[in-house]
Amino acid sequence: MGGMVTYLTTYPATCKPEDVLANQQVKELFNDLYFDVYAKGEYPASITHKLTNKNIMPVFEKGHVELLKENTVDYLTFSYYQSKVVKYTDESEKSIIPGITTNPYLKINEWGWAIDPIGLRIALNDIYARYKTPIFITENGIGVQEELNENYTVEDDYRMEYLKQHIEQMKLSMEEGVEVIGYLTWGSTDILSSQGEMKKRYGFIYVNRDETDLKDLKRYRKKSFEWFKKVIATNGKDLEY
C-alpha cells in the first residue's frame, strides 16, 4: 500500500533567514504534512501546533492515534512537474500561502510552470533521507498546446528532452542510494488536464478532439511514442532520440 502527494520542490528566494524559514514552512505544509502521516503515522509537530492554536486541529477519537501508527505505507508515491521559490511575506496578508513565486533562473513552459529536472532529484533525495522508504514516481510530464502536422503526427522533441532530463536525474538519485521502485509519465494519451483543458496535451498519443468538439476521437502516435517505447524496453538505459 502506498500514499501519493503532488510534490512541489521549493527553494528560498534568497539566503536571508526569513526566506529560508518561509520555505521550510511551505515545504512542511505542501509535502511533509502528508508524507509524515503516510510514513510515520503522525502530523509534523509544527503543523499540529499551528492547527491547535487556530482551533482547527482534527479531533482524534479513542484509538485513532494508534491506528495511524499501526497502518503506515509500504512505499511513497508522488507526482512531479515543477518547482517554485518562496519569499518571506508578512503573515498578516490574506493569502493562505503567501510568497510563492517562479524561479527566475529556470525556463518555464507556456503554462508558467518551471522546468526543473534537478528539482526531481532534490525531491527524491529529501524524501528518502526523511523516510527511508521506497519511492514510486507516479506522474511526470509536460503539457503543451499541440496540433497534428501534415503527416498526422506531432514532432514533440521537447517532450522527449523534458522526460530524458528528468529520468537522468532520477537515475543519479538511484546511484546516490535512493530506492526508486517505479516511474510513470503523465500520460499515455492526451486527456483532460486538471483544469478541464484538452488543449494542454501530455500524451505520447494525440487524441483528435478539443475543449468542446469531440470530432472523430481518432488517435495518432506522436514522435515521442516510439522513443518512450524504447525507453521502457531498455529500462531507461537508452534515452537518445
Image (tube, grey):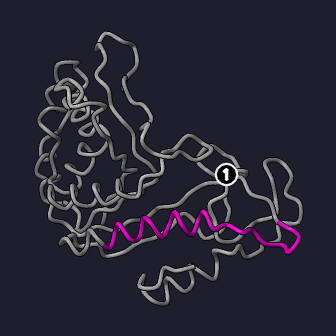
Instruction: Give the labeled residue for mark 1.
Output: 200
17 sits to left or right of 193: left
Choose top left, top right, bottom left or bottom right for residue 69: bottom left
Q: Secondary structure at mark 1?
A: loop
| Number of dots carrying numbers | 1
- x and y percentages locating residue 177 in the rendered image: 18, 72
* Quarter that holds the N terminus: bottom left
Tell me which residue sits at (67%, 57%) in the image. Answer: 201
Q: Is residue 148 above or below residue 115?
A: below
Q: Nearer the viewer, residue 214 or 157?
A: 157
Tell me if residue 164 is in the magenta stretch: yes
For this orientation, the residue located farthest to the front is 105
Q: Is residue 92 above or below residue 31?
A: above
Q: Nearer the viewer, residue 21 or 139?
A: 21
Q: Is residue 44 above or below residue 153?
A: above
Tell me if residue 2 is in the magenta stretch: no
* Residue type at tag 1: Lys
Highlighted range, magenta: 149-171
- x and y percentages locating residue 124 in the rendered image: 27, 60
Q: Is residue 109 above or below residue 50?
A: below
- x and y percentages locating residue 222 in the rendered image: 71, 73
Q: Nearer the viewer, residue 17 or 134?
A: 17
Estimate how packed mark 1 is, as few (under 14), some (14 to 19) or many (20 or more) residues with alpha carbons within 10 Å: many
Tell me which residue sits at (39%, 39%) in the image. Answer: 84
Q: Nearer the viewer, residue 65 or 221?
A: 221
193 sits to left or right of 62: right
For this orientation, the residue located farthest to the bottom is 233
Tell me which residue sits at (84%, 67%) in the image. Answer: 149
